[in-house]
Image (cartoon, rainbow, N blue to C red):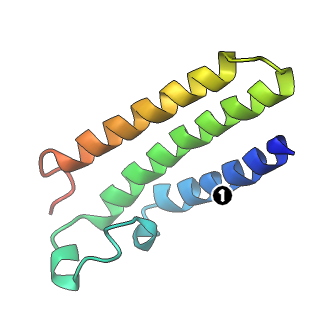
Amino acid sequence: MSIFVYGIIMLLFLTFAIVLSQGKGAFLIAGFNTMPEEEKKQYDEQALARFMGKMMYGYCFCVLLWILNELFHTQWLFFSIGLVLFVALTIFLMIYVNTGNRFKK
């Protein structure tokens, strides 16, 4: 059952990753979609969407590791690696996006 749930999550993440890596779907990014239009114009939507697409591919890989954990019935190996990667990606994402003016026009 958990493989099925992980599979659905992975497919959703993969769909978001594909859409975002094409530079589209910036409205799917939390925080960006609630900005006023004047503030949105200051940001390069395509660059931000492509970056978030790459991050979603990373999160997809984490979920794939969790699926492998369930398939091979390992107690900790794939799950732990996936969890550490998930946390590391999230920390990197927060630092990279919030420091500097990388996505400003």
Q: Residue 29 location, x and y as percent?
A: 40, 65
Residue 93 found in image quarter: top left
Q: Residue 57 location, x and y as percent?
A: 54, 43
Say above or below: 46 vs 88: below
Q: Nearer the viewer, residue 64 or 24?
A: 64
Q: Residue furthest front?
A: 75
Residue at figure coordinates x 67%, y 29% from the top left: 65
| Element marked by disc 1 | helix
Image-based side of 25 in relation to 100, left or right: right
Q: Nearer the viewer, residue 12 or 18?
A: 12
Q: Residue 27 location, x and y as percent?
A: 42, 73
Residue at figure coordinates x 29%, y 44% from the top left: 94
Q: Residue 72 location, x and y as percent?
A: 84, 21
Residue 88 found in image quarter: top left
Q: Nearer the viewer, residue 32 or 48?
A: 32
Q: Amino acid at mark 1?
A: Leu
Image-based side of 28 in relation to 71, left or right: left
- How many numbered circles are shown? 1
Image-based side of 102 in relation to 34, left or right: left
Residue at figure coordinates x 21%, y 56% from the top left: 103
Residue 50 found in image quarter: bottom left
Residue at figure coordinates x 56%, y 59% from the top left: 16
Say above or below: 5 vs 105: above
Say above or below: 13 vs 80: below
Which residue position is annotated with label 1? 12
Q: Quadrant of the N terminus?
A: top right
